[in-house]
Image (spheres, rainbow, N blue to C red):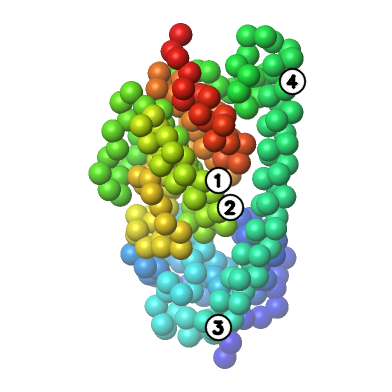
């Protein structure tokens, strides 16, 4: 018998992180002692629902979801997983996400440009390439950067002494993040003598190591506790943190607003 039935409103309330476009089916309550997803195992699992691509559940550490393609065959069969239907659903989601985030990116760029103009008008002492909000008391702009601490480097730790650092906060599943990677690659190659780009994610090491959809030409690290992201105030991805060679924050925000010209100007500035 299929485990999928009509959707229930309490389920939608419980799974707050689901995108609106996900079609989620409620399931009769299923409890599992453990659930293995790739290299990770969840314990004391209570299934909340299932879509064509993902299984949503509570466990002893909170609420989570994993893609069926990473689960064991017996679990896939139990919830009527159809690989072909899952691929089609993922493609639809990618298209919807792409359209949405492209619109958001344009709005972010426009806002950043307006902010920069306003800041320059209000104060002649503001750096004209500043793209962050100069009014916010919580802004890190023009202040010493928080220490860059990671859980693990996925390759050799890069040498950052005497160079600026561009931290790229990202995830493998984010379409906008994947679209921003070529730009990060270009920054690393173009400014390799002055800049180190670092890709930082809270995802598991295996998920990052298995990612192959887009070539990455800069060092990657995992920060499972999101220490740096919390210090910077990252609430969505992609986002970047630019620290100059003196250790001062020069930009925090969407990577689309940090174009090569603005980046070059900051990197070639002489220390005061």
Tell me which label, 2 or 1, sits earlier in the chain: 2
Which element type, helix, strand or loop, lies under badge 2? helix
Classed neighbour count for the residue bearing mark 4: other residues with Cα under 10 Å, few (<14), some (14–19), many (≥20): few
Label 4 and label 3: CA atoms lie apart by 51 Å
Task: Single out the residue that lies furthest toward the bottom.
Answer: 1
Does residue 23 appear anywhere in the picture? yes
Of the pair 157 and 270, the residue shown nearer to us: 270
Pinpoint residue 45: horizontal percent, then vertical percent.
46, 66
Classed neighbour count for the residue bearing mark 3: other residues with Cα under 10 Å, few (<14), some (14–19), many (≥20): few
Label 4 and label 1: CA atoms lie apart by 25 Å
Pinpoint residue 149: horizontal percent, then vertical percent.
35, 34
Instruction: Point out which mark residue 84 bears.
Output: 3
Which corner quadrant of the image does residue 22 belong to? bottom right
Please say if 61 is above or below 79. above
Classed neighbour count for the residue bearing mark 1: other residues with Cα under 10 Å, few (<14), some (14–19), many (≥20): many
Q: How many marks?
A: 4
Left or right of 178? Residue 209 is left
Please say if 186 is above or below 263. below
* Circles 2, 3 touching at the beta carbon (< 8 Å): no
Does residue 62 appear anywhere in the picture? no
Q: Which residue is mark 1?
A: 238
* Circles 2, 1 touching at the beta carbon (< 8 Å): yes
* In front: label 4 or label 1: 4
Left or right of 25? Residue 221 is left
* Residue at figure coordinates x 62%, y 26% from the top left: 132
Pinpoint residue 173: horizontal percent, then vertical percent.
52, 59
């Amino acid at each position: 018998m299929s485990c999928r039935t009509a959707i229930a409103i309490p389920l939608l309330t419980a799974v707050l992180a689901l995108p609106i476009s996900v079609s989620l089916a409620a399931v009769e309550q299923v409890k599992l002692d453990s659930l293995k997803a790739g290299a990770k195992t969840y314990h004391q699992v209570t299934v909340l629902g299932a879509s064509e691509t993902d299984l949503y559940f509570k466990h002893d550490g909170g609420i989570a979801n994993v893609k069926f393609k990473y689960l064991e065959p017996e679990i896939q069969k139990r919830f009527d997983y159809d690989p072909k239907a899952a691929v089609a659903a993922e493609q639809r989601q990618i298209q919807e996400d792409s359209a949405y985030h492209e619109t958001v990116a344009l709005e972010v760029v426009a806002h950043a440009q307006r902010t920069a103009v306003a800041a320059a008008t209000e104060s002649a002492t503001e750096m004209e390439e500043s793209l962050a909000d100069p009014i916010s008391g919580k802004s890190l702009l023009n202040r010493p950067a928080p220490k860059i601490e990671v859980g693990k480097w996925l390759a050799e730790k890069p040498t950052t002494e005497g160079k600026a650092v561009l931290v790229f906060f990202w995830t493998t599943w984010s379409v906008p993040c994947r679209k921003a990677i070529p730009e990060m690659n270009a920054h690393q190659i173009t400014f390799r003598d002055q800049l180190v780009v670092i890709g930082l994610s809270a995802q598991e090491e295996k998920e990052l190591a298995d990612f192959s959809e887009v070539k990455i030409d800069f060092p990657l690290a995992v920060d499972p506790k999101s220490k740096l992201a919390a210090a910077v105030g990252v609430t969505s991805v992609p986002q970047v943190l630019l620290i100059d060679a003196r250790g001062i924050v020069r930009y925090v925000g969407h990577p689309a607003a940090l174009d090569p010209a603005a980046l070059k100007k900051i990197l070639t500035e002489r220390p005061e």
